Amino acid sequence: MLQRIQSIFLALAAAASFGALGLPFATTAQAVQGSAIFSDGAFSVQDQIALLVLFAVAGALALASIFLFRNRNTQMRLSIFAFIANLIGIVFGVLFFMQNSNDAGESTIQDGLGAYLPVAALVFLLLAYRFIRKDDKLVRSMDRLR
């Protein structure tokens, strides 16, 4: 059912994944000339197409799995795939940031809200998976009683 707790967690995970698309991961006080990621003063998902695709796919999978409440196995699989896409996006984003953060030079780098949203999406996806599995066990136990 759509009013289950896992639907709320999946919606929050989708919102966090889609929110990462619009918010910067890190910012500098001014634009850094010659930098791959801070040329505009902010490192965001739009700086790397792979990050954009991974977080968009993770959000879409989490959103799609909300409406698959009748098939809990598919819902669990999509939640796992969204978790993996978010995790790969986080790892890829951190690696890309580490490779190019030396280009910032003397500028101080401040982290943004976009850096924390994918981690929140991971937590929400884990909680959703836990409640989907719990719901599946409850349905299976009721089927055994019949």
Image (cartoon, rainbow, N blue to C red):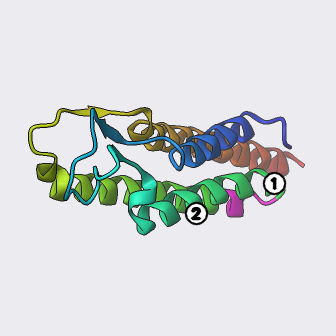
- Mark nearest the camera among 1 and 2 is 2
Q: Residue lying farthest right? A: 146
Q: Few, some or many C-alpha atoms within 10 Å of disc 1 (few <14, some 14-19, many ≥20)?
A: few
Side of 32 where 91 appears, left or right: right
User: Can residue 46 be seen in the rendering of this structure?
Assistant: yes
In space, the residues marked 1 and 2 are separated at their CA atoms by 16 Å
Side of 27 where 117 appears, left or right: right
Residue 26, position as x, y percentages in the image: 32, 40
Q: Main secondary structure of the magenta part?
A: helix
Q: Few, some or many C-alpha atoms within 10 Å of disc 2 (few <14, some 14-19, many ≥20)?
A: some
Q: Which mark is residue 57?
A: 2
- Residue 105 lies in what quarter of the image? top left
Q: Nearer the viewer, residue 69 or 86?
A: 86
Query: Could you tell me if the residues under marks 1 and 2 are in contact, i.e. CB atoms within 8 Å?
Result: no
Which quadrant, please, contains the N terminus?
top right
Q: Nearer the viewer, residue 62 or 93?
A: 93
In this picture, is 107 found above or below 99?
A: above
Label 1 or label 2, whichever comes before in sequence order = 2
Q: Which mark is residue 119?
A: none
Residue 60, position as x, y percentages in the image: 66, 58
Side of 141 where 107 appears, left or right: left
Q: Which range is magenta?
A: 71-75
- Residue 7 lies in what quarter of the image? top right
In this picture, is 144 found above or below 96?
A: above
| Amino acid carrying mark 2 in the image | Val
Question: Circle 1 sits in a helix, a strand or a loop, which is it?
Answer: loop
In this picture, is 141 found above or below 50?
A: above
| Amino acid carrying mark 1 in the image | Phe
Residue tagged by mark 1?
67
Q: Residue at x 28, y 44 (%)?
A: 31
Q: Residue at x 66, y 44 (%)?
A: 10
Q: Residue at x 55, y 47 (%)?
A: 17
